[in-house]
Image (spheres, rainbow, N blue to C red):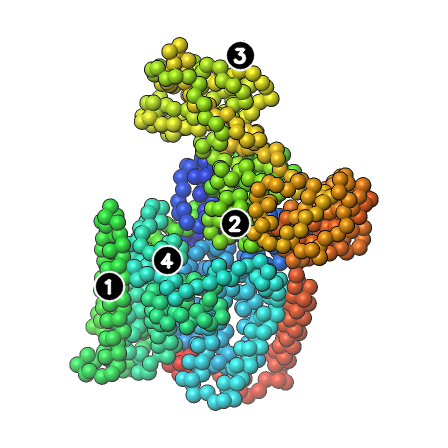
């Protein structure tokens, strides 16, 4: 029944994605963003709005890397976001972790569900193996597995690499337990493979947390076993050897990661302070997951987003945790792994939610750059272990697990009449849990806005009800006189766990329509046809910056680690460009900035109903309002050209007769004879209230007076303002800059004619050593197009001012570019990509050192003549990492071969000893074989 609960929880959460009825990715979020919102994929709704990172960063990188890997090469450089950033050489995408391999084996729309299925299977297997070593029953192993895979961290972070790393933590503890208890040299291989898989998973903070936990766990196990100094040293040698080998196996990703972190990541921006922890109110979600709001509505309490705060453990799980400490073991001894879990969970809770000793902890390596709230992954694991112990003791009491030994049931009853230290300690544990949850509930209720107070109370009542039912089940399971009722009560517990966990997972986990998985819109098609070597940018969340990697469209902004120099250029164009440390976008006023010219930003994409930049001019004087009959067109007085669009005012709104939620209006630009020069069909939300909508128009190649016309395509009557002659009065927008509207409808695309090519020739060089002044010059537009800005006088080379040149792109494959440059004099071939260490320039077969140029970019000095210029990205540290990983893999394979050979020899009849035929070993579930004996 317990394992059926695990399977049921998994099928409820992932099942539709496994059979192709949905995709286990939050691409339904695209329905709320331009240009996808125009099409309404699926039913057009949006579920969980919080996993945005997974669809604008994680999944697009996976798609890009997967496609190139299946074509026979690893793409080391992603040219599509934030001027370019490393890709295949870093573990960020996690594609090379075994946990992510379903991406290589399954179609794109099935792969996310397959990855989550692997996560659940691996985490469950790891918990089962670990709890088996601790002597727990198969049912208790299933309960522990369910408690861990449904914990708040594993639920909320689904879709990120974080859970792919976290799923391996139980396996690491299992391997450590083998090392400290048995000290067999072959376990070096287990540690190495598990640790390497975690390191390749792409989130090192979880690996650090798991390492600290494993070290503490191993130390406790050795201490309780009264290990000798030799045994301590033997365990340490095996564990350290496995760790070194694991790091070596992953070195081909870790060494480039270390180089990139040292040169491109500002750890000062990611530094943590002792006051950066979760509020107690977040702990209320441990048993009442909706107390701080509904996932598809509003959240409240604390400054962190729900993904960082969600602390679900489960009402039944918490009851089992308390039961584990209030019950006596059948053999009369304390379970020291259980005490380790209890003490660790208490210390972790104080650290995460109260910040107790957080300052000293943040001084430890790995804690200083990652938010401590992510330590919830370890809390979930420790609570799961404790819950498994609690369930195991109940099953032993009822006989649902191993048949109890003679006299065992009598020792289960806690002798409350004897105030021993054990009883007092158990009471303190139970009281501590109750007090902590009471404080969390008080904070949670106090944080709820008045309009949501009833929702918070309802969620609290539901959580308390589940706790009460679980307590009743535990009490019944402890009854010795009615064994049948006790057995039924035990069976109810995993059902309660799975029911609440499945309800939570159903709310958090995505089930997006298959057709919403990165569909190409008309805007994407336009950019794909016209972008060429240039870039585009977008405003707000239009085009969802970062998702363009899935479409292979080069963008100036995006979701990636930006270099400090590229960030400075973006903020020179728009001071609010960096919405987060890694996410950049633009605003409408910034689209004309000269800084974007230097970054080869040719197009700007704006939401279709967003304000139109330019001069606003009324086409007449409002006198009255008039209804335009269905099928007729309202026309304005003549307006000067060119016209960029209009703000359409609808005094009584628009309400389609068919009751649809949107109406379709067509704004047309007409010549004097009434001919249509350009037109845009806009979707307007149906309403009976006054409303205004911005509609942009493609700029035609025509001059002279023009007219604007408006009509409803649904055949509805429109009420519009008119002048004294009955002509439509509207606010027209005339251009006040050089941008040209080239595409409208699902989004508005502006072309920026002042842009400079991504690969261009500079016959002049100017040196400015001050970084701030360089940025000011680039953003001020005071540099001539043929001038490159250098920051170091050592980079200056002889040039021929006025020399002319042609730059032709022969190949542009992301991390390999080939140019043909022909010039009449010396100068620089400027590359408007974000500069990272690792780019190598080869001119006519000879390597040339590139120079830093235009603050964030780079250039290659060239003499006069015709040249073949090859630009190749060679990730720094990759060669050393590959050599290290190759040697480590060879050592691993050699060790496997030796072990296989020894195993084969031991199976031969002449090698079978009397001890080998003496009989079976004791079962691990027996008290004598319990892992507590170490």
Q: Are marks 1 and 2 in contact (CB under 8 Å)?
A: no
In this rendered view, identify the residue nearer to me: 685 or 497: 685
Q: Measure the C-alpha gap from mark 4 to mark 2.
A: 22 Å
The answer to whether residue 533 is seen in the rendering is no
Q: Are marks 2 and 3 in contact (CB under 8 Å)?
A: no
Whichever of callouts 4 and 3 sits on the residue coming sooner in the sequence is 4
The residue that label 4 is drawn on is: 309
Q: Nearer the viewer, mark 4 or mark 2?
A: 2
Q: Nearer the viewer, mark 3 or mark 1?
A: 3
**Residue depicted at 52% across the width and 29% down the height:** 736
Q: Work out whether 191 lies above or below 86.
A: below
In this rendered view, identify the residue nearer to me: 497 or 265: 265
**Residue depicted at 59% across the width and 34% down the height:** 752
Q: Measure the C-alpha gap from mark 2 to mark 3.
A: 47 Å
Whichever of callouts 4 and 2 sits on the residue coming sooner in the sequence is 4
Q: Measure the C-alpha gap from mark 4 to mark 3.
A: 61 Å
Whichever of callouts 4 and 1 sits on the residue coming sooner in the sequence is 4
The residue that label 3 is drawn on is: 672
């Amino acid at each position: 029944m317990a394992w059926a609960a695990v399977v049921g929880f998994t099928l409820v959460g992932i099942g539709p994605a496994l059979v192709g009825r949905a995709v286990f990715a939050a691409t339904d979020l695209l329905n709320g963003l331009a240009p996808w919102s125009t099409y309404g994929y699926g039913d057009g709704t949006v579920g969980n709005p919080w996993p945005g990172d997974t669809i604008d960063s994680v999944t697009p990188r996976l798609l890009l890397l997967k496609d190139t890997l299946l074509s026979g090469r690893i793409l080391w450089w992603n040219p599509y976001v934030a001027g370019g950033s490393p890709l295949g050489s870093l573990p960020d995408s996690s594609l090379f972790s075994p946990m992510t391999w379903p991406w290589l084996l399954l179609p794109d729309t099935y792969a996310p569900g397959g990855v989550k299925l692997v996560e659940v299977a691996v985490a469950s297997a790891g918990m089962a193996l670990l709890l088996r070593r601790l002597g727990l029953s198969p049912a208790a192993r299933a309960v522990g597995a369910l408690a861990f895979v449904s914990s708040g961290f594993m639920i909320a972070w689904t879709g990120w690499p974080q859970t792919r790393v976290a799923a391996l933590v139980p396996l690491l503890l299992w391997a450590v337990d083998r090392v400290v208890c048995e000290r067999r040299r072959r376990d070096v291989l287990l540690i190495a493979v598990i640790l390497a898989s975690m390191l390749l998973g792409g989130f090192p903070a979880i690996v650090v947390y798991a390492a600290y936990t494993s070290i503490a766990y191993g130390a406790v196990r050795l201490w309780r076993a009264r290990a000798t100094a030799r045994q301590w040293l033997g365990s340490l040698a095996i564990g350290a050897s496995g760790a070194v080998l694991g790091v070596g196996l992953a070195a081909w990703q870790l060494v480039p990661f270390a180089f990139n972190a040292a040169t491109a990541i500002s750890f000062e921006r990611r530094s943590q302070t002792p006051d950066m922890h979760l509020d107690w109110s977040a702990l209320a979600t441990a048993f009442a997951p909706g107390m701080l709001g509904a996932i598809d509505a509003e959240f409240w309490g604390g400054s962190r987003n729900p993904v960082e705060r969600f602390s679900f453990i489960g009402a039944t799980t918490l009851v089992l945790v308390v039961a584990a400490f209030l019950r006596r073991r059948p053999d009369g001894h304390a379970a020291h792994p259980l005490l380790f879990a209890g003490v660790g969970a208490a210390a972790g809770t104080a650290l995460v939610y109260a910040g107790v000793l957080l300052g000293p902890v943040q001084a430890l390596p790995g804690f200083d750059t990652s938010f401590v709230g992510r330590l919830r992954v370890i809390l979930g694991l420790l609570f799961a272990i404790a819950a498994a112990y609690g369930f195991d003791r109940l099953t032993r009491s009822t006989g649902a697990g191993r048949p109890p030994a003679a006299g065992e049931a009598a020792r289960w009853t806690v002798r409350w009449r004897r105030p021993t230290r054990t009883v007092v300690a158990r009471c303190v544990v139970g009281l501590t849990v109750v007090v902590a949850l009471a404080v969390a509930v008080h904070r949670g209720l106090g944080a709820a806005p008045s309009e949501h107070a009833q929702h918070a109370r309802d969620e609290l009542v539901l959580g308390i009800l589940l706790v009460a039912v679980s307590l009743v089940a535990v009490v019944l399971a402890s009854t010795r006189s009615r064994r049948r009722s006790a057995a039924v009560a035990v069976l109810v517990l995993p059902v309660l766990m799975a029911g609440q966990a499945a309800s939570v997972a159903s709310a958090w986990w995505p089930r997006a329509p298959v057709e919403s998985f990165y569909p190409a819109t008309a805007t994407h098609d336009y950019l794909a046809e016209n972008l060429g070597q240039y870039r585009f940018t977008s405003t707000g969340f239009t085009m969802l910056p970062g998702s363009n990697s899935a479409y292979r469209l080069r963008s100036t902004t995006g979701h990636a680690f930006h270099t400090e120099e590229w960030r400075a250029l973006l903020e020179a164009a728009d001071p609010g460009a960096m919405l987060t440390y890694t996410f950049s976008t633009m605003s409408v006023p910034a689209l004309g900035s000269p800084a974007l010219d230097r970054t080869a930003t040719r197009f700007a994409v704006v939401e279709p109903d967003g304000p139109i930049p330019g001069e606003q001019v009324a086409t007449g004087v409002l006198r009255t309002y008039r209804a335009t009959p269905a099928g007729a067109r309202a026309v304005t007085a003549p307006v000067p050209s060119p016209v960029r669009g209009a703000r359409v005012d609808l005094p009584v709104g628009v309400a389609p007769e068919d009751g649809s939620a949107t109406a379709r209006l067509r704004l047309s630009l007409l010549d004097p004879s009434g001919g249509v020069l350009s037109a845009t069909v806009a979707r307007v939300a149906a309403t009976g209230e006054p409303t205004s909508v911005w509609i942009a128009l493609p700029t035609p190649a025509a001059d002279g007076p023009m007219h604007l016309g408006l009509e409803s395509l649904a055949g509805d009557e429109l009420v519009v303002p008119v002048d004294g002659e009955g002509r439509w009065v509207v606010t027209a927008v005339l251009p006040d800059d050089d941008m040209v509207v080239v595409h409208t409808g699902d989004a508005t695309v502006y072309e920026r004619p002042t842009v400079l090519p991504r690969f261009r020739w500079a016959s002049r060089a100017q040196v400015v050593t001050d970084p701030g002044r360089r940025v000011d010059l680039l953003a001020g537009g005071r540099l001539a197009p043929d001038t490159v800005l250098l920051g170091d006088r050592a980079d200056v080379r002889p040039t021929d001012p006025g020399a002319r040149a042609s730059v032709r792109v022969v190949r542009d494959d992301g991390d390999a570019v080939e140019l043909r440059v022909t010039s009449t004099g010396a100068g620089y071939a400027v590359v408007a990509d974000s500069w990272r260490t690792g780019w190598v320039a080869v001119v006519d077969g000879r390597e040339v050192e590139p120079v830093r140029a235009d603050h964030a970019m780079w250039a290659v000095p060239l003499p006069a003549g015709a040249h073949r210029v090859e630009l190749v990205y060679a990730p720094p540290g990759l060669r050393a990492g590959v050599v290290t990983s190759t040697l480590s893999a060879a050592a691993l394979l050699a060790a496997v071969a030796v072990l296989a050979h020894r195993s084969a020899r031991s199976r031969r009849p002449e090698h079978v000893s009397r001890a080998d035929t003496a009989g079976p070993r004791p079962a691990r579930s027996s008290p004598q074989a319990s892992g507590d004996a170490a």
